[in-house]
Amino acid sequence: MTERISRRGLLRTGAVGLSVGLSGCTSATPFVGKREEFSRELGFDSGTLTVATGSGDVTVSRTDADTVQLSGVKKASSVFADLETATVETDAENGRLDIRAQSEDDSWFGLRSVSVSLDVAVPEGVAVESAASTNGAVTVSDVSGDASLNSVNGDVEARNVDGFVLLSTTNGSVRARNVAGLRGARTTNGDIRVDVPAIDGATSLTSTNGSIVASLASTLDATVNARTRNGELDVTGLSFDDGSASDHQLLGTLGDGTYELVVESTNGDITLQSAN
């Protein structure tokens, strides 16, 4: 089943905003553009979820409702933009719900491009498989599922996720807190701060231009290789077996050392600390 969501098919409020600040009255930045809100209840109550947008934020959280609740905002910085060029499509098939927002660039240098931010609330029976944005933040909280969270230009965060998560962005920070396990965290320009309660295979935490803070569980089963080229390495509250350490690198074993955990920054500090 495939549904196409457009301006006419949704409950929404739409607005075109144009304001000019008057001297002595306000110091707020004037808003010029278009904005349209939409919302819809989707008839999907169990299975897995994928959600993605090209430009805009993605948020996934838990709802007490019986089915998936979808809402969002179409927005353009130009009053000449056509919000109809942005569409949101949903496809539910074989126990998986896909939500995709797409926007056609109808303008010179993208000046009339439309962003679509998505807010998806899922019931207990729906597990998150992936959430992604090209230009926007991705935040997933209070859900279940082994989830892959991705952005290019935006922060990525997982909170209270009952599953193993994989987090990546190019320009933005990465956060993971109170997750069941971690399968990796990567950024080029940004900091990483993650809980590492468990890993189930070779796992890497890497940043080129940013610091890394990793809170490792005492029950973690890993061979740890942490290194920074132009930063400092600090270890707090952890005891490694068969280890060696310097100002810029640490090699050591936690538990049986079954899986490899690589923590690496080029131009940033690394802190390994106990999660307990």
Image (cartoon, grey):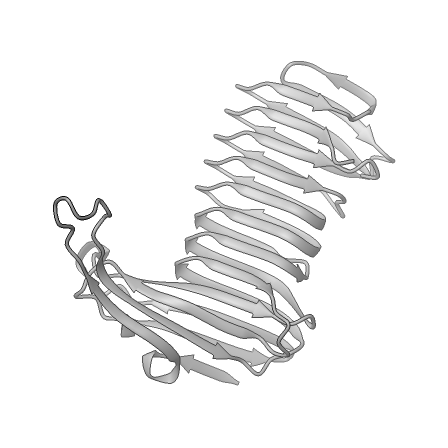
Residue at position x 28%, y 74% in the image: 84
From this view, report whether residue 226 is shown above or below residue 36: above
Q: Kindly give the residue lying farthest to the right in the view shown.
A: 256
Q: Is residue 75 left or right of residue 137?
A: left
Where is residue 70 shown, x and y percent of the image?
50, 73
- In the picture, measured across the screen, residue 184 lies left or right of residue 2, that is right
Which residue is located at x 53 percent, y 25 percent?
A: 268
Residue lying at the far left in this picture: please name it. Answer: 23
Residue found at x 52% / y 35%: 191
Q: In the rendered picture of this protein, how many numbered marks are placed on residues?
A: 0
Q: Nearer the viewer, residue 233 or 120?
A: 120
Location of residue 239 (image quadrant)? top right
Instruction: Reply above or below: 203 against 40.
Output: above
Of the pair 101 and 41, the residue shown nearer to us: 41
Q: Quadrant of residue 127?
A: bottom right
In-front residue for pair 203/34: 34
Residue 269 location, x and y as percent?
A: 57, 24
The image shows residue 157, relative to residue 207, as above or below, that is below
x and y, in percent, of residue 147 in the image: 63, 58
- Furthest-front residue in view? 24
